[in-house]
Image (cartoon, coloured by chain):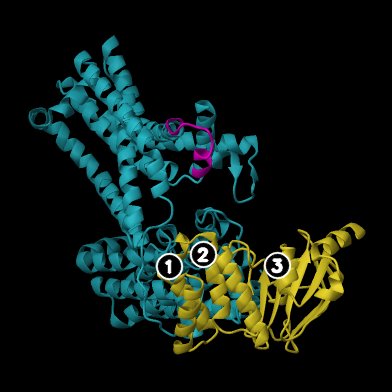
Chain colours: A yellow, B cyan
Amino acid sequence: MLVIDHLTKKYGSKIAVDDLSLHIAPGEIYGFIGHNGAGKTTTLKAVVGILDFDSGDILIDGKSIKKSPLECKSEIAYIPDNPDIYDYMTGQKYLNFIADVFNVGKAERGERIKKYSEIFELSGALANPIASYSHGMKQKLVVISALIHEPRLIIMDEPFVGLDPKASHILKEIMREICDKGGAIFFSTHVLEVAEKLCDKVAIIKDGKLIRSGTMEEVKGDESLEAVFLELEADNA
Amino acid sequence: MLKTLIKKQFTEMFRNYFYDQKKNRARSKAASVGLIVMFVFLMFGVMGGIFGFLAYNLVPLFSIGYGWLYFAILGGIGLVYGVIGSVFNTYSGLYVAKDNDLLLSMPIPPRTIVAARTAGVYLMALLYSASVTLPAAVVYFVLVPQTALSVVGAILMIFIVSAIDFVLACLLGWVVAKIASKLKNRSFAVVILSLLFFAVYYFVYFKAQDAIKDLLANASQYGDAIRGSAYPVYLFGRAGEGDAAAMGIFFAVSAALVALSVYVLSHTFIKIVTSSQGNDVKGKMKNIKEKSLFGTLLSKEYARFKSSPTYMLNCSLSTLFLPAAGIAVLIKGADLKNVLDLVFTPFGGDLPVAVCCVVCLITGMNVITTPAISLEGKTLWIEKSLPVNAKSPLLAKLALHVILTTPATALCSVCMAIGLGISFADGVLVTAVSAAFSVMTAAFGLVIGIQKPMLDWTKEIVPIKQNMSILISMLFGTAAVLVLGAVYFIAASAMPAALYLSIFFALFAAASAYLIYWILTKGAEKFSRL
């Protein structure tokens, strides 16, 4: 579903992502871990087409994000690390805006807005301006907006930051449901316990380079993911 | 502790003089000194000059025994000016200060926080009111013979006015905070209130000279009426003149009011700041409506526009001025035509070109497209991550400008053509040229916005006001009008106005077409790379 093929991204002389290759198949929850500034967000932004890259390619269902950006984007949803959204809209207007862009029919959008806003306990706030939302409420709204068009691939950058424990739990369940239905999720996180429990596969990146990837068992073996991660960080220092 | 907090408060208030937010770095000493000198010049040179001139005109009141009226009038103006200058600072500095939570979490007594915050409010009240009362005192000292008590009275007046201003600013700041938290369409309310304020300001300004003449001519009549029906105002004026009893009363009353304000604020501070968090406006769920991609992008642009009084007031005033000017000409057309004929006939010029210049000049003040991309700020990722062609958001931004400007331009042109008796054919051409001009300036503004985006702002005033792109856009509009007018009146007045306007319609339309083509090609490419 998602192929990252020899991706390289530079900021001036600094190489942020260095020849990174990954393959995320349908049905997989793929975790992406690394220290601060390792290149996770850069990679995710390149995948969703909001950051140009220097070489390599990114294919979504066989289509290049560079050559067919609109076709690729209509298949995916993106949840950024910071929910900077249109403060001047109400939650309902924002969701309608996203639904309009993805051409979601009136009945379907109504049903999904109702369903997810109830699940995430945001129904009562949807009519209020986003400016009045807390960080967590904005994060929930971004999550709902990412689900409204039933994307096949969701790219998430630290999706659990700001969510309360209940919302985090629900999001994990939804992530699993999406993948069980043939979708795929590629997400970054610093919470290694979450990655360990949730992910089918994991990739560890350091200073822009992939240092290990594979199924959870392949990556961590009998150790904890945290122990492996710290070991790899030390080995590659 | 109090000293530290007051220092922090004043640093925040005058931060712009020492820190360049646009470049995110400290200003050089020379730049800081230059800005401070400019501020002092504006406050006490320009504004002080205006009020000093007003004071000079009121000096004859002393010779007829109504010196107290001099202080009552200028003190009253100082009061109004001080309140206007400090009330919004009170609201933002006292009730919605971003560091209230931080300070309250530290072991600082609320009364110390309030004292530091109110010191800032008092300083603003003093600065604004003193730009009236200080020149009034200086003029008084120079032109009127003094005694020791009269000198004390005039100086005391400066502080009494600032103290009353402080009390009123605290009270009105509280009212503003209450209104702000309750109003549903507060952006429009702020725009309307601001426009009303400017209308009243200019009305008073233009009427002031006549009012002063009237007042001087009938000083005894007005003075006796005030003394009879508004004795505190008389007493207020007497305090300025140096009447010991009046000075004592006003000093005591103003000191008591200040103490009461600080006491009340200290005892309600925690409740105020905790209840002012968030927005308690409750919206209503609306029926879901499906929109086309362009429709939804346009709605989003309109929502952005109407959410910001700063954006509306700074970038779209012509949308109101154009119909107002058109209707004014419809009403006063005959008188205006005589004046315009007098002005333009010696140049051999025709009225349609002059009218077209006026309409275009007002139209060019609308710069809605220019900050539109910068205003996306940190939310730019949304449109970039969605399956939206980069052309579509740009077209939506352009369309909003055109929708808000071009009909107003056309209405103004039609009204002016009718009001000034311009022929139908020339009227159509004036309308067409002005409309083409409005599209051209909208497109130019967007081109500049794409070329010089400013996405890392923290206050929206930065891309809207403190942005070179806005100046460039306005200069472009003015330059185009100058070319339209100057070429005609200098070199082409022999040419029939209809032919001349037709040529400019073609030029503006061609320029619009080229700019829109650039937006849809290179502009879209550049936008997608931001």
Kind of residue indicated by mark 3: Val
Q: Earlier in the sequence, mark 1 or mark 3?
A: 1
Q: Secondary structure at mark 1?
A: helix
Tally of marks? 3
Q: Which residue is mark 3?
A: A194
Observer-nearest of B500 and B323: B323
Kind of residue indicated by mark 1: Ala
Q: x%, y% of residue B395? A: 53, 78
In the image, what residue occupies the spot 32% across and 83% down?
B425
Circle 3 Cα neighbour tier, 10 Å, few/some/many (<14 / 14–19 / ≥20): some
Is residue B373 at least partly visible in the picture? no
Q: Which residue is mark 1?
A: A125
Q: Which residue is mark 2?
A: A137
Which segment is the magenta one? Answer: B101-112
Measured in 3D between alpha carbons, the distance from the residue under mark 1 to the one under mark 3, in whole angstroms, is 28 Å
**Same chain, marks 2 and 3?**
yes
Q: Secondary structure at mark 2?
A: helix
Q: Is residue A68 above or below residue A9?
A: below
